[in-house]
Image: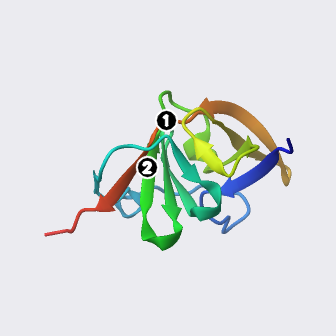
Amino acid sequence: MRKMLLIIPAIALLSGGGAVAISSKNAPEPVRAVGEPKNCVTISQIRSTKVIDSRTIEFRMLGGKTYRNALPQSCPGLKFEDRFSYRTSLNQLCSVDIVRVLHDQGGQLYEGAGCGLGKFQMVEKIAAN
């Protein structure tokens, strides 16, 4: 079987280098769980991703659904680098798969820590009062 390597930037790189200030504006939006967690999501349906913290990745899907994946362990460098890759021979990303933190060194990307995924929980935004 042929394996695919996919690089998923959690956000577009807007500048070369420098620090990013984290404020309440960058805090994750409050959400609530919807339904039962899923073991897998279809890769071709992933529209974008967002690293929330060192243990949480949000997957925004075609059609407007959003899934949060709570990694069973903290993933070193995930939040700081804000990007990851994965390899799979299927069209699904599952809770048994590993993501690898991508580091930028002199304009070259290399894979760092490998971290296992958890289940995919569909979430909805909670309306502000």
Residue 125 against residue 33 in the figure, above or below: below
Residue 1 or 88: which is nearer the viewer?
A: 1
Residue type (three-letter) at the residue carrying disc 2:
Arg
Residue 20 or 57: which is nearer the viewer?
A: 57
x 77%, y 39%: residue: 111
Residue at the outermost bottom position:
63
Locate the N terminus and report the quarter of the image it occupies: top right
Locate the C terminus and report the quarter of the image it occupies: bottom left
Q: Tell me where residue 127 appears, x and y as whole percent.
A: 21, 68
Residue 26 against residue 62 in the figure, above or below: above
- Per the model, the C-alpha gap separating discs 1 and 2 is 9 Å
- Please tell me the numbered disc located at residue 109: none
Sequence-wise, the earlier of marks 1 and 2 is 2
Q: Tell me where residue 87 appears, x and y as whole percent.
A: 75, 42
Q: Tell me where residue 46 appears, x and y as whole percent.
A: 58, 61
x 61%, y 46%: residue: 93
The residue where tag 1 is placed is 118
Q: In which quarter of the image is residue 25?
A: bottom left
Residue at the outermost top position:
73
Residue type (three-letter) at the residue carrying disc 1:
Gly
Q: Tell me where residue 40 appears, x and y as whole percent.
A: 53, 45
The residue where tag 2 is placed is 68
x 68%, y 64%: residue: 13
Q: Is mark 1 on a helix, strand or loop?
A: loop
Q: In this view, does 35 lie to the left or right of 82?
A: left
Q: What element carries label 2?
A: strand
